[in-house]
Amino acid sequence: GENVEQHPSTLSVQEGDSAVIKCTYSDSASNYFPWYKQELGKRPQLIIDIRSNVGEKKDQRIAVTLNKTAKHFSLHITETQPEDSAVYFCAASRVDDYKLSFGAGTTVTVRA
Amino acid sequence: DGGITQSPKYLFRKEGQNVTLSCEQNLNHDAMYWYRQDPGQGLRLIYYSQIVNDFQKGDIAEGYSVSREKKESFPLTVTSAQKNPTAFYLCASSSQGGSYEQYFGPGTRLTVT
């Protein structure tokens, strides 16, 4: 099955700086890569996703890049703000598969 | 903030007892999922259901059972066979599988002593 590894497990950044989280996956057939954000005490919510037919996708301060050859994808958060403090999960699946494999999560802390 | 609900928020049980966690959605979603969340291990899939009266094992199904008799409901039973049942359990739903967004419930924290 699919195995998703996520790094780093914790990340502390100064407000206004950028944060980068990296994930690798094992199944070369995976072609859907979402990112979920879970704030403290709340449910995970989808923040951005990318499909294998594109290499990069951007939504305001958040961007995701995908390198299918190397089987890795990354989340980039620019101009970090206190509300970006949360646990971020990457995931991977095949478009036609119901099973979503999650990484272990990255706890991001934005220091004021 | 409706959509998908789980109850109760906290649940305490004695070892050896079965316990059932509730998950209900009013999003008219076909697919429903159960995940277990442990510190440092992300979200691990227990069971999922693509449609009513059908469900499949996920990666860590041992010691758990589910049913899907109604589209809106997907209860999870944690049996006494589950070796380490204390965890945070999340239910989710999606309109279809694959590349469709999964909407999560608020979770149930189960403590077994």
Image (spheres, coloured by chain):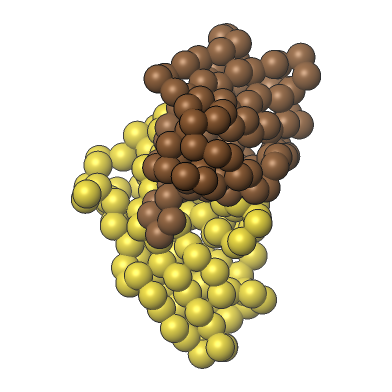
Q: Quadrant of residue B102?
A: top left
Residue under the point 33% across and 72% down: B8
Q: Quadrant of residue A64?
A: top right
Q: Is residue B29 above or below residue B98?
A: below
Quadrant of the image for the N terminus of chain A? Answer: top right
**A68, above or below B58, in the image:** above
Indicate the position of residue A24 as horizontal and vertical percent values: 72, 31
In this image, B1 relative to A106: left or right?
Answer: left
Residue that lies at the very extreme toward the front in this rendered image: A112
Q: How many marks?
A: 0
Q: Residue at x 40, y 59 (%)?
A: A41
The image shows residue B63, relative to residue A56, as above or below, that is below
Shade representing chain A: brown
Taking depth in this image into account, of A109 and A75 the one nearest to the observer is A109
**Residue in the foreground of this view, choosing between B58 and A64:** A64
Residue B35, horizontal then vertical, whole percent: 52, 55
Q: Which chain is yellow?
A: B
Residue at x-position 48% and y-position 55%: B34
Front residue of B9/A112: it is A112
Q: Look at the picture and state if B61 lies above or below A105.
A: below
Question: Looking at the image, which residue is at 56% across and 88% down?
Answer: B113
A46 displayed left or right of A91: left
Residue B12 image position (x, y, % from top left): 44, 83
Q: Can see residue A20?
A: yes
